[in-house]
Image (cartoon, grey):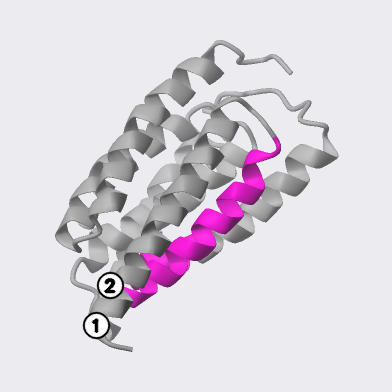
């Protein structure tokens, strides 16, 4: 397969990944269980695309996203989506706690060192910090913790830079759209904190 054909395939994969992931975010903002399968599809396509582009942490992250989407789908289905939107805990320590955030940043930095030493990733630290924090945000999203949207706002802002740098232009526009959708998601979920 020549380089032109691979680029055309990757552009198509990028496009369909974006479409599926936009449907996912729209569904999540609206608290719809049907959103999770779109996340699985979009992340699967993204994993292949990022691996092909040398963004290994992003590829790995999208595999983790797909697995977390399975968790979210099962979680939301098993409760008939009757789960409260809650705030991150500030008086305890655990996965639902605001205080877990620095540990995920540290995990991202540590992963960045490993990625820098053993791969050709051109942006290992920012890539790995985004990956680690995205895992936390996705877990919080599946558990309906409101602050997941703040994390997404920051991560989507940084992702715009990464995708422009790696010439994933559709994903750069997609990240900008996700930034806007993160603000919308926060506003929509905030109205329902403590409600089913």
Residue 129 quadrant: bottom left
Q: Is residue 14 left or right of residue 83?
A: left
The circle on residue 178 is: none
Query: Is 51 in the magenta?
Result: yes
Q: Is residue 99 left or right of residue 41?
A: left
Quick check: can you spot residue 111?
no
Q: Dot 1 corresponds to which residue?
A: 3
Residue 149 quadrant: top left
Above or below, 117 against 122 in this view is below
Which of 117/22 is in front? 22
Above or below, 27 against 2 in this view is above
Above or below, 40 against 158 in this view is below
| Range drawn in magenta | 33-62
User: How far apart, in angstroms, are the residues tagged by discs 2 and 1?
Assistant: 6 Å
The crowding category of the residue bearing disc 1, from other C-alpha atoms within 10 Å (few below 14, some 14 to 19, many at least 20), is few
Where disc 2 sits, the SS reads: helix
Which of 157/178 is in front? 178
| Residue shown at the point (46%, 39%) measured from the top left | 99
Q: Dot 2 corresponds to which residue?
A: 7
Query: Is 108 in the magenta?
Result: no
| Residue shown at the point (32%, 63%) measured from the top left | 11
């Amino acid at each position: 397969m020549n380089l032109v054909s691979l680029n055309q395939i990757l552009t198509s994969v990028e496009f369909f990944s974006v479409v599926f992931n936009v449907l996912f975010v729209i569904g999540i903002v609206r608290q719809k269980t049907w959103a999770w399968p779109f996340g699985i599809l979009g992340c699967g396509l993204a994993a292949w695309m990022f691996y092909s582009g040398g963004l290994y942490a992003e590829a790995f992250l999208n595999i983790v996203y797909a697995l977390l989407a399975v968790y979210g789908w099962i979680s939301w289905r098993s409760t008939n989506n009757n789960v409260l939107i809650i705030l991150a805990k500030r008086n305890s320590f655990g996965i639902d706690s605001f205080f877990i955030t620095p540990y995920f940043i540290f995990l991202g930095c540590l992963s960045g060192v490993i990625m820098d030493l053993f791969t050709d990733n051109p942006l290992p630290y920012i890539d790995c910090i985004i990956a680690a924090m995205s895992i936390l945000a996705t877990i919080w999203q599946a558990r309906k913790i409101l602050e997941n949207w703040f994390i997404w706002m920051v991560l989507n802002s940084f992702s715009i830079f990464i995708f422009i740098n790696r010439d994933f232009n559709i994903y750069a526009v997609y990240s900008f759209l996700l930034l806007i959708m993160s603000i919308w998601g926060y506003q929509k979920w905030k109205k329902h904190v403590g409600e089913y």
